[in-house]
């Protein structure tokens, strides 16, 4: 991923929100549409990559930057802001999973459901 400052990246995020998300907010909130295209585009520009080191494909802009991405999105569509939180949370959990600090997977759910 190219090196970019947090401020430059937030400008890109705001532009994406204006073009792809804002026109769809009513459909998202009133009709339950899922902003899949917006979320894919946000991921493509590094919107979920703040907590991931550049060596692993992230932008390394940090957790504060992830919060700024959520904040800018939530200003326009709170539902989409929450979806970004969900996606970012998964990315944060991955580090704990690959270090073995958090045991995760479908087998865990199956085990918990067993009598």
Image (tube, rainbow, N blue to C red):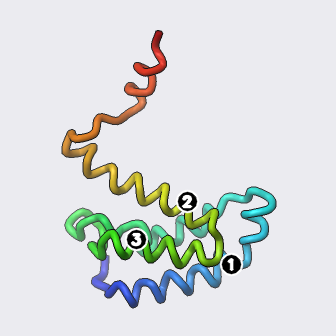
Percent across and percent down for residue 25 are: 72, 71
Q: CA distance from mark 2 to mark 1?
A: 15 Å
Based on the displayed image, in which of its 4 quarters is residue 106 positioned?
A: top left
Vertical placement of 56 versus 3: above or below? above
Q: Which residue position is annotated with label 3?
A: 66
Vertical placement of 30 versus 3: above or below? above
Left or right of residue 10: residue 92: left
Q: Nearer the viewer, residue 90 or 59?
A: 90
**Mark 3 touches mark 1? (CB < 8 Å):** no
Q: Which residue position is annotated with label 1?
A: 22
Percent across and percent down for residue 16 are: 56, 81
Of the residues under marks 2 and 1, which one precedes in the sequence?
1
Q: Nearer the viewer, residue 29 or 24?
A: 29
Left or right of residue 33: residue 37: left
**Category of crowding for the residue at label 2, using alpha-carbon neighbours closer than 10 angstroms: few (below 14), some (14–19), many (at least 20):** some
Left or right of residue 16: residue 67: left
Left or right of residue 28: residue 50: left
Of the residues under marks 3 and 1, which one precedes in the sequence?
1
Residue drawn at the location 26% of the way across and 47% of the way down = 96
Q: Which residue position is annotated with label 2?
A: 83
Based on the displayed image, in which of its 4 quarters is residue 79 positioned?
A: bottom right
Of the residues under marks 2 and 3, which one precedes in the sequence?
3
């Amino acid at each position: 991923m190219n090196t970019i400052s947090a401020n430059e990246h937030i400008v890109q995020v705001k532009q994406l929100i204006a073009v792809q998300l804002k026109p769809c907010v009513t459909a998202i909130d009133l009709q339950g549409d899922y902003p899949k295209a917006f979320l894919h585009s946000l991921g493509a520009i590094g919107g979920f990559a703040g907590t991931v080191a550049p060596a692993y494909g992230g932008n390394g802009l940090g957790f504060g930057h992830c919060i700024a991405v959520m904040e800018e999105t939530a200003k326009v569509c709170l539902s989409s802001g929450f979806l970004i939180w969900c996606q970012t949370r998964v990315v944060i959990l991955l580090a704990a999973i690959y270090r073995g600090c958090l045991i995760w997977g479908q087998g865990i759910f199956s085990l918990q459901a067993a009598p």
